[in-house]
Image (spheres, rainbow, N blue to C red):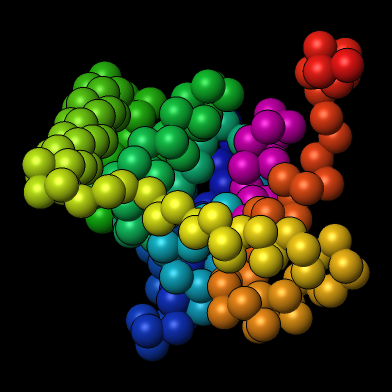
Amino acid sequence: MKRVAFYVRVSTADGQTTENQIRALHEVAARSGWNVTAIFSDDGISGSKGRDRRPGLDALLKAVTRREVDLVAAWSVDRLGRSLPNLINLLGELQGRGVDLFLHQQALDTSTPGGRMMFQMLGVFAEFERSLIRSRVMAGLERTRAKGTRLGRPPLEAGKAEAIRAMLAAGVGIRETARRTGIGVSTVQRVHAAMTAPQDPKTITAAA
């Protein structure tokens, strides 16, 4: 019998509980002859959260890594996540461990030839989505350059940079230096980091 783990999730906005999902999956398990070994749940957590913010998903994937699961069953694809790339990454992790996925609402079962074909199609769509995003970013950068707009942080004026270094060298704190010069704390921190960075011994020798 297949060792099957359920993954169920509801977000705060759903106004639902995981009971209906679990009941539907148990019905499928009974018809399919599955051995349900564990149920992992994330209650009141959005599907947009990553694994580090979803303890149920994290525990499930750890069980997968320990080879304790043959198949993961979820009520619907949106219970796993809200993003196609995230879903593909999850499917890839399961596939890499030899674990199949069953999605009740989408009738997707990667243990079947049809389900494996659907998995491959999802991978194509995810790559297409990533390609579109890259193309939009590059086109936006090109438009910005064509308008003569400088990309990245504006350079720090020499006079202000000297004032920051002088205050820091005199022992003035980073936040107080930022307040006195009217420069952001992060900028003062970068100047401080540059001042305290160890010098390259080769450079020192060459200068000597």
**Residue positioned 50% across, 57% down in the render:** 156
Instruction: Read off the magenta span.
Output: 52-68
Image quarter of the C terminus: top right
Placement of 61 over or under 99, stated as above or below = below
The percent coordinates of residue 67 (x first, y second) are 69, 29
**Residue 89 image position (x, y, % from top left):** 43, 36
Could you say where residue 166 lies in the image, as x and y percent from the top left?
A: 77, 63
114, 207: nearer the viewer: 207
Name above or below for residue 10 compared with residue 1: below
Q: Is residue 103 visible?
A: no
Residue sitting nearer the eye, 89 or 174: 174
Q: Quadrant of residue 61?
A: top right
Residue in the image at 69% along x and 65% along y:
164
**What residue lies at 45% left-to-right and 70% top-to-bottom?**
46
- In the image, is residue 24 part of the stretch drawn in magenta? no
Q: Position of residue 22 (x, y in %)?
A: 48, 65
Looking at the image, residue 107 sits to the left or right of residue 160; the answer is left
